[in-house]
Amino acid sequence: MSIVQAQGNASKQPNFIVFYCDNLGYGDIEPFGSTVNRTPHLNQMAKEGRKFTHFYVTSGVCTPSRASIMTGCYAQRVGMHWNDRDGQVLRPISPYGLHPDEITIAEVLEKAGYQTGIIGKWHLGDQPGLLPTDQGFDYFYGIPYSDDMTREVGLRLGQRYEGYQWPDLPLMLNDKVLDHQVDRNLLTRDYTEKTLAYIENHADNPFFLYLPQAMPGSTKQPFSSAGFRGRSMSGPWGDSVEELDWSLGEIMSKLEELGIAEQTLLIFTSDNGSPMGKDMEGVERGTNRPLHGRGYTTAEGGFRVPCIMWWPGRVPASTVCQEMVTTMDLLPTFAQYANVSLPEGVKIDGHPINDLIDGQYGTKTPYTAFYYYDQHQLQAVRSGPWKLFVPLQEFRNHPHFDSADSVQPLLFNVVEDISSSHNLASSNPEIVQQLTILAEEARKDLGDLNRPGQNQRPPGKVSNPIPMVSK
C-alpha cells in the first residue's frame, strides 16, 4: 500500500484539529440541547461554524470507535471490534492493537508534509510497535488507554484481563513513560496546555493534531480541576463538560491570536454516547436525550454524537447539516483538503464530505447504508431516514430487548422520530426488505456472529507484552 502526494500548492494546505471527547452524550452540551451544562465556547463555535446533527461513530465503546477515526474503516474491517483476551476494548498489557500495516489518517497527512501529533488517550495498543509513534504520529503525549484502567482497578479484577499485572496509569511522551503519578483531575488542563504549545510551535507549517480528551470518561465520578469542580448543575459530569468547553475556547483563542484560524478546520465531537445513569431521565452520567438509549449499545444514543465544525471563512456560520456522515469520513476528507491521494490497494469505508462541510447546496449523504455492530454482531442498518433492527435469535446486549424473545424487526424513522419510539415495520414491509438486503451485504463483507466477512483484516499482535513502566 502506498500514499502518493497529489499535485498542488502545499502552502494552501489547511491545519486539522480533532477535539475528541470520551463518552460525551448527544445532549450534554448547550448547542445540542443541554440546559444544565454551561458551554459558552461551544455556543460560539456553533454560531460561527456548522452543526452536524446526524454525525455517527461506528461503535458504542472506545477502542473500535477510535480505530475507525484513524483508518476510515469499520472496526470489523480492521479487526479492532473484539479479541479473545480483552473483549471489545483493549486492556493494559494487551498483545493486540491496530495493525501496523493499516494506513492511518496521520500517515496519509504525514506523507503530504504535515506535522502530526496526538495529545490524550490512544487506546489502540499500548505495546512498542503499536503506539501512536508507530502509526504515523511524530508526537504523542498522553495515556495509552482509558483513565479508569488503573492499577487499583486491575488488582480488583485479579485474574480477569490479567488485572494483577496492570501498572499504575502511565503518562507517556512518544514511546517512553514519563510518570505513573497521573493526577486525573489535571488531565484536561494539562492536555490543553500541551495543545496550545503544540499549536504555537507548528503555526508556520501544516499540522494535524488529534486531541482525544480523557473526559468525561468512564468513571462514575469524572475528574476536573479545582476551578471547575462543583460549579455545574449536573455534578462531576457537568464539571468535566464545562472544563472541556473552557479547553475548546482556549484553542479557538490561540488560533485567532496566531492568525491561523482561517487556515484551520477544528472539529469537536465524541467517541460514543454517554453511558447515562440508572435514571434515564437524569444527567449524573450524561445524557443522549432526545435520542434513544445509552452509550455502549447500538441505540441512536450510542452511535450518534454531537459534532460541530469551525473554519472561519470556509465553513458557513450558524448552519446545520442534517445529512448522515461519520468519523470514517475524516480520513478521505482531510486527504482531499490537503490535496493528497488516498492509499492505493486498501479498502476504506469512509467518504469525502468536503462539500457537506463547506455547505454546498443540495449535497446529500454519501451513504447508501450505515451499519451498527455490537462486537461481532450486526444489529441494525440505516439507509436514508430509516433504521432497521434486524431480528436476532441471540444477542449479548440490545437497546430495545432484554432477551431474544421477538423475531419481529424494528423499523424507525430516525429523522422524524428522533427518540425511536414508533416501530413502523408492519406498515413499511418494502423498506424492511430493502434494509434486510443491505444487512446481508454487510454480513458478506464485514461478517456477523459466527460468520467471517470476506474483506476483514487482522489486528496487530505482539509477542510477550509487558507493562508500560518508566525505566
Image (cartoon, rainbow, N blue to C red):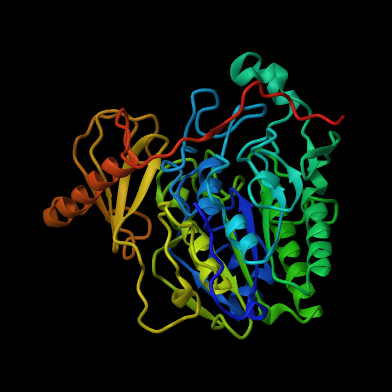
> Percent position (x, y) of residue 300?
41, 52
> Percent position (x, y) of residue 33?
54, 65
Q: Is residue 415 above or below residue 227?
A: below
Q: Is residue 350 left or right of residue 174?
A: left
**Which residue is at a point 43% across and 59% down the rendered structure image?**
350
Image quarter of the C terminus: top right
Residue 25 or 233: which is nearer the viewer? 25
Query: How many marks are shown on the rendered structure?
Result: 0
Residue 15 or 166: which is nearer the viewer? 15
Question: Can residue 155 be spotted in the picture?
Answer: no
> Percent position (x, y) of residue 211?
68, 56
> Percent position (x, y) of residue 224?
77, 49
Residue 42 or 119: which is nearer the viewer? 119
The residue lying furthest to the top in this view is 159
Q: Is residue 437 above or below residue 379?
A: below
Q: Is residue 129 above or below residue 43?
A: above
Q: Is residue 299 above or below residue 305?
A: above
**Which residue is at a point 60% across and 21% down the rendered structure image?**
161
**Which residue is at a point 67% across and 80% down the rendered structure image?**
11
Question: Can residue 123 be spotted in the picture?
Answer: yes
Q: Is residue 339 left or right of residue 355?
A: right
Q: Is residue 129 left or right of residue 100?
A: right
